[in-house]
Image: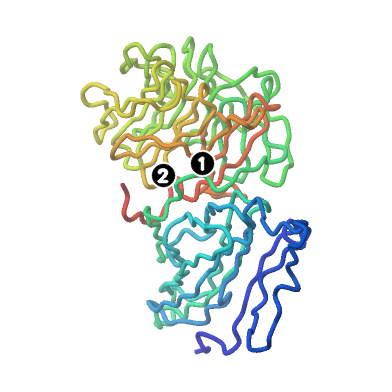
Amino acid sequence: MRELFPGRHLLVLLALSALLASGCQRPADDDDSNDDDDSADDDDIGGDDDDSVSAGILIVTADLSDLGTLESGASATTSMYFENAGGSSLVVQLALSDLSGAWQIPGSTVNVAPFSTESRPLTFNAPASAGTYSLSVNAAHDGANPSPQELVFSAVSEGDGSGDDDDSTSVPVFDCLLAPPTAASETIIPGARGYHGLAFDDVGEVVGSDGSSLIKSDYSGSWSVFLPGTGPAQQMLYLPNGDLAYATFSGVMRATPAGGISVIGAGLNLYGLAMGPDGLLWGAGDAGVYRIDQDTGVSTYLFGTGSDSPHSLGFSPAGDTLYVGTVGSGTVYSASIDPSGNVVGAASAFATGVGGGWHDGVGVDACGYLYIPDYWDSRLFRVNPSTGLSTIFMDWTSVPGGYGHGAVFGNGIGGWSESNLYVPLPYNGNQVKEVIIGVPRKEWAGVVINAP
């Protein structure tokens, strides 16, 4: 086995260009026994020197980047340091690339006072499956050098010693206590287009509307017209047979992979669309919530939401609760679903005061949190599934055209991360942006612990 902590002390230093351009440097290790005269470096005579730094400046370092080789079940820990070399406090949001539970760091937010340093332990828990495990830690912040900083770590697990490790039996684990309180960052995905919804296929491409046609694109930016002349399609999804279902204000449509178009549900003026736990389409709009058999085209009105109009919808990870976003008072409704996929009892108010009252999507992660973009507030809200309390997860009020619709998680294929939301921007050329959530989608195949 390799030595766990090599003799040399590895320092990974990330100091961005804003720090270098300002001429600021990390403080030298002054040894007063050598009679260093710090006053020579700091001459305030005449009041010309101003040692204050108006904004926080982040420097991220770590003791070790390679945590060595460990037996299965063993753990190793290094420390990460978050230094603020500026004069204003910093709020640092952490996002981990590996959500399997092999790597863990307590909390997702680090508050750093001016001219001070905070530390956090980073622990590697060696899984049963042998192999090299890599991790990148993204540190987004609000300082003078705003580009997220990133440190990369690695470690090796020897496995459980049986000699026949099968990676297929290794089940990843996500601890919901590590769920970030706000989005770490967001970025525009080149080539992708979306109007009010998106759908991810099983070959690494996403489909969305540019307002007149359906556009298919991959994560690298390559795109093509999938179906021309469809008009502004609303929310959409792929059916189990590979066909695309998409909502319009005149009906629910079907598009085959070859480009054939047919009607699933004629006359339904729907915006929201989701796949139910019963394998049927569920839709929101037209003053109600509907269930639609995609094979027969038969639609069934299920319920309304009083003076609020149903607009978007999503299901809990277990499929036993339906959440309905609305247009109206800012209330999100919920309804219980039995094992056969039927609504039990009446829908009721689940969360109130979620934005101004125009909910353009309901995304649900593996922990059960809801992500709801509200048009009136131009913010993305996260709702706790246990309490119904909502918090601002991403604020788009100061971003021209930055308000996002849909709130669809990637499927983990072709670069579309299962831990990120993808939102269309109909007020910004129908572009699509990726919002770093840091929690896997509800369909994630791993194990979730400490769910709210």
Mark 1 residue element: strand
> Which residue is pictured at 72% across the width and 56% down the height?
50
Residue at the spot of label 1: 409
- Name the disc covering residue 48, or none: none
What color scheme is it? rainbow
The answer to which quarter of the image holds residue 208 is top right
Mark 2 residue element: loop
Q: Is residue 189 above or below residue 292?
A: below
In the image, 78 versus 427, the foreground residue is: 78
For marks 1 and 2, give the CA distance. Answer: 9 Å
Query: Residue 416: x percent and y percent?
Result: 59, 47
Query: Residue 209: x percent and y percent?
Result: 64, 26
Report crowding for label 2: few under 14, some 14 to 19, many 20 or more residues within 10 A (C-alpha).
many
> Which residue is pictured at 53% across the width and 11% down the height?
250
Residue at the spot of label 2: 442
The answer to which quarter of the image holds residue 387 is top left
Q: Amino acid at mark 2?
A: Lys
> Which residue is pictured at 68% across the width and 86% down the height?
35
> Which residue is pictured at 62% across the width and 59% down the height?
58
In the image, 294 versus 114, the foreground residue is: 114
Q: Is residue 406 above or below residue 149?
A: above
In the image, 117 versus 359, the foreground residue is: 117
Q: Amino acid at mark 1?
A: Phe
Q: Are marks 1 and 2 in contact (CB under 8 Å)?
A: yes
Report crowding for label 1: few under 14, some 14 to 19, many 20 or more residues within 10 A (C-alpha).
many
**Which residue is at the far front?**
46
State left or right for residue 424 relative to residue 20. left
